Image (cartoon, rainbow, N blue to C red):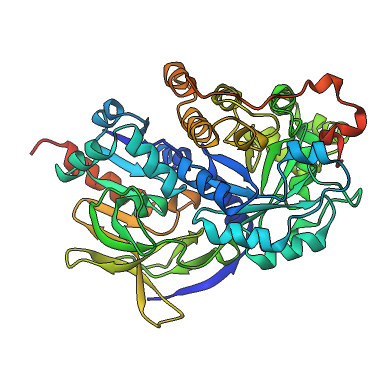
C-alpha cells in the first residue's frame, strides 16, 4: 500500500514524514500518473489558492475527483480542507467540490490570531493537541457530513466544525502533520488498507 | 466541544506558517493592483513595500518601513498572507507592522539599518523572517527568535549569483557540523559565532530548525528552479516580477517553475516567450556601500 501527498505546494514533506513514522510508504504526487499509483491521497497544508491554481493548470482536478468518487480515501488538512470543499464564504477559487461544506478561510483571523490548543474530538478519550495556522472552519455542512470536532465562533456563539468526515473524505482545519500525534494519519491508513484490499 | 490551553505566538505557530509557504513564491508588491496580480499568478504570500529593491537602489537615501496606509491597502486587497519589512533593529516599526495585522515581518537589509543590534523577536506574537549569508548568521537570527530564514543574495540586482553563494555556504557548513565529533562543537559555535545549543541541534538533525527560502536577485523561472534544486524551501522574488516586461506571465511562470523545479521540460515550457527579464546588475561592480547583503551582523 502506498499513500500519496499532493506535492504542488505546502508542507507535503511533513505528511510523508508522519507516514514514515507509521511505517507506511508515501509518495509525492504532482501528476495524474503519480496519482494513479497511490491507494490514498493527502492534500497538505499550504496556500489553498496556489494549490488550486496549480492543480487546475496541470490537469489534476478531474483525476482527483474520479479517484475519490471511486472510493479512494483522502485526507485534507487546512488548505487541503479548503481545496476539498464545495465553496468558500469569500468568493471563487479552484476547489474539488467533493466535501459538501462551505468553508470560511482565515476564520480565526490573521497570523497573530493563530494558535495551538487542546481539543476534544468525537471517538477519542483524551483531548488532542492541535495547531491552527490562519486556519479555516466550516461555515455550513451538508447532511452527509459527520462532525468530529467543532469550536465556538466567539462572534455568533455558534459551533463551527473543524474536523469532519464524509464517507472516504476526512478533513481537519488544523495541522496533524506538525505535531507528534498520528491519530489522523492512522484513520487514513486504516481506510486505505480497507480500500486497497480486494473484497 | 471546546478548546483549552490556547497559546498564540508559540514557536510551532510561528514556524508553522513558514512551513505552509514551502514550495511557493513570495512576491514584492508596492500597491493593491500588484498584490492582486501576484495572488492571481499563484503567489503564496506578498511582501508589502514602498518600493521594490531595484528602486530603493536607484533612489538612494534612507529606506524605511512602508506607509501603514499602503500596507493596509495591500492587506485589504488579497486573501493570502501579507509580509512587510522593518529596518534592522527598528523594533518600533515592527510593533507598528504587528498592530496592522501583518502575517510575517521581514527584518530586512533592503531597508537602512538603525542599529547594530537586531530586534529581539521573542517579544512579538507575529513571526519574523531574516536574511543570512551563512550558517552563523542564520543561527544568530534564530537565536533572536526568527521563525524563518532566507538567503540574503544581493537584492534589486536581478543577479542570482550571491543567493547561490549564500546557499552553498549554508549547505556546506551544515554538512560540516554533522561530521564533527561532539567535542568539536563548542569551537565550531565560536568560529561561526552562533549559539551553542543551535549548533548542537544542527549537528544532530543536519538541517535548520526553520524553513529557509532563497532571496535576492531571482529574475527567471530557471533562477527559481536552481535555488530549489540547491535545497531552498521556496523563493522570494523582489524586483524580478514587476521590473520585467510582462509581470503577470512571469509571476505565473516562476510559481510553476518552483513547483516543478525537477522537471526541466516543464521549466522550459513556462520560460518560453516571457519577454524581457529585468535588466540586472553585475554584483562585482557594486561599490561596497551599495552592497545590501553586508548590512546586519
Tell me if B55 is positioned left or right of A33 in this view: right
Q: Nearer the viewer, residue A82 or B208?
A: A82
Q: Is residue B30 above or below residue A89?
A: above
Q: Position of residue B174 (x, y in %)?
A: 70, 29
Quarter holding the C terminus of chain B is top right
Tell me if B79 is positioned left or right of B61 in this view: left
Q: Position of residue A186 (x, y in %)?
A: 33, 49
Q: Nearer the viewer, residue B212 or A60?
A: A60
Q: Position of residue A144 (x, y in %)?
A: 17, 64
Q: Is residue B199 visible?
A: no
The image quadrant of residue A124 is bottom left
Residue furthest toward the bottom? A157
Q: Position of residue B129 (x, y in %)?
A: 69, 47
Residue drawn at the location 81% of the way across and 63% of the way down = B92
Tell me if B258 is positioned left or right of A147 in this view: right
Q: Nearer the viewer, residue A64 or A5?
A: A64
The image quadrant of residue B191 is top right
Amino acid at each position: 500500500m502506498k499513500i500519496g501527498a499532493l506535492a504542488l505546494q505546502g508542507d507535503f514533506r511533513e505528511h510523508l514524514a508522519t507516514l514514515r513514522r507509521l511505517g507506511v510508504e508515501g509518495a509525492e504526487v504532482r501528476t495524474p500518473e503519480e496519482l494513479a499509483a497511490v491507494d490514498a491521497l493527502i492534500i497538505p497544508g499550504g496556500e489553498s489558492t496556489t494549490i488550486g491554481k496549480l492543480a487546475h493548470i496541470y490537469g489534476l482536478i478531474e483525476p482527483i475527483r474520479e479517484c475519490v468518487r471511486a472510493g479512494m480515501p483522502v485526507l485534507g488538512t487546512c488548505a487541503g480542507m479548503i481545496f476539498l470543499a464545495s465553496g468558500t464564504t469569500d468568493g471563487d477559487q479552484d476547489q474539488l467540490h467533493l466535501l459538501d461544506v462551505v468553508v470560511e478561510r482565515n476564520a480565526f483571523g490573521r497570523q497573530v490570531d493563530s494558535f495551538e490548543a487542546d481539543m476534544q474530538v468525537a471517538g477519542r478519550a483524551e483531548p488532542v493537541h492541535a495547531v491552527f495556522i490562519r486556519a479555516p472552519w466550516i461555515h455550513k455542512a451538508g447532511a452527509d457530513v459527520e462532525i468530529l470536532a467543532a469550536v465556538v465562533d466567539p462572534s455568533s456563539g455558534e459551533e463551527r466544525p473543524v474536523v469532519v468526515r464524509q464517507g472516504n473524505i476526512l478533513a481537519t482545519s488544523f495541522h496533524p502533520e506538525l505535531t507528534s500525534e498520528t491519530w489522523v494519519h492512522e484513520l487514513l491508513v486504516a481506510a486505505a488498507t480497507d480500500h486497497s484490499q480486494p473484497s | 466541544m471546546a478548546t483549552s490551553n490556547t497559546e498564540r505566538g508559540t514557536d510551532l505557530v510561528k514556524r508553522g506558517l513558514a512551513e505552509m509557504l514551502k514550495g511557493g513564491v513570495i512576491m514584492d508588491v508596492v500597491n493593491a493592483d500588484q498584490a492582486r496580480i501576484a495572488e492571481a499568478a499563484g503567489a503564496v504570500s506578498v511582501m508589502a513595500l514602498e518600493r521594490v529593491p531595484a528602486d530603493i537602489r536607484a533612489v538612494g537615501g534612507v529606506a524605511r518601513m512602508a506607509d501603514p496606509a499602503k500596507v493596509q491597502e495591500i492587506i485589504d486587497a488579497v486573501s493570502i498572507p501579507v509580509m512587510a519589512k522593518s529596518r534592522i533593529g527598528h523594533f518600533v516599526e515592527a510593533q507598528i507592522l504587528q498592530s496592522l495585522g501583518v502575517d510575517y515581518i521581514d527584518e530586512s537589509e533592503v531597508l537602512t539599518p538603525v542599529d547594530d543590534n537586531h530586534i529581539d523577536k521573542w517579544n512579538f506574537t507575529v513571526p519574523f523572517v531574516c536574511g543570512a549569508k551563512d550558517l552563523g548568521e542564520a543561527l544568530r537570527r534564530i537565536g533572536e527568535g526568527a521563525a524563518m530564514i532566507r538567503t540574503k543574495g544581493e537584492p534589486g540586482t536581478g543577479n542570482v549569483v550571491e543567493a547561490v553563494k549564500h546557499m552553498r555556504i549554508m549547505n556546506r557548513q551544515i554538512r560540516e557540523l554533522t561530521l564533527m565529533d561532539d567535542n568539536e562543537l563548542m569551537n565550531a559555535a565560536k568560529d561561526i559565532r552562533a549559539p551553542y545549543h543551535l549548533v548542537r541541534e544542527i549537528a544532530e538533525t543536519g538541517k535548520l530548525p526553520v524553513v529557509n527560502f532563497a532571496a535576492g536577485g531571482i529574475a527567471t523561472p530557471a533562477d527559481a528552479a536552481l535555488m530549489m534544486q540547491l535545497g531552498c524551501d521556496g523563493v522570494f522574488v523582489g524586483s524580478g516580477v514587476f521590473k520585467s516586461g510582462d509581470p503577470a506571465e512571469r509571476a505565473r511562470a516562476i510559481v510553476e517553475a518552483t513547483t516543478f523545479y525537477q522537471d526541466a521540460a516543464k521549466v522550459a515550457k513556462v520560460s518560453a516567450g516571457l519577454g524581457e527579464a529585468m535588466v540586472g546588475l553585475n554584483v562585482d561592480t557594486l561599490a561596497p556601500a551599495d552592497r545590501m547583503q553586508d548590512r546586519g551582523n
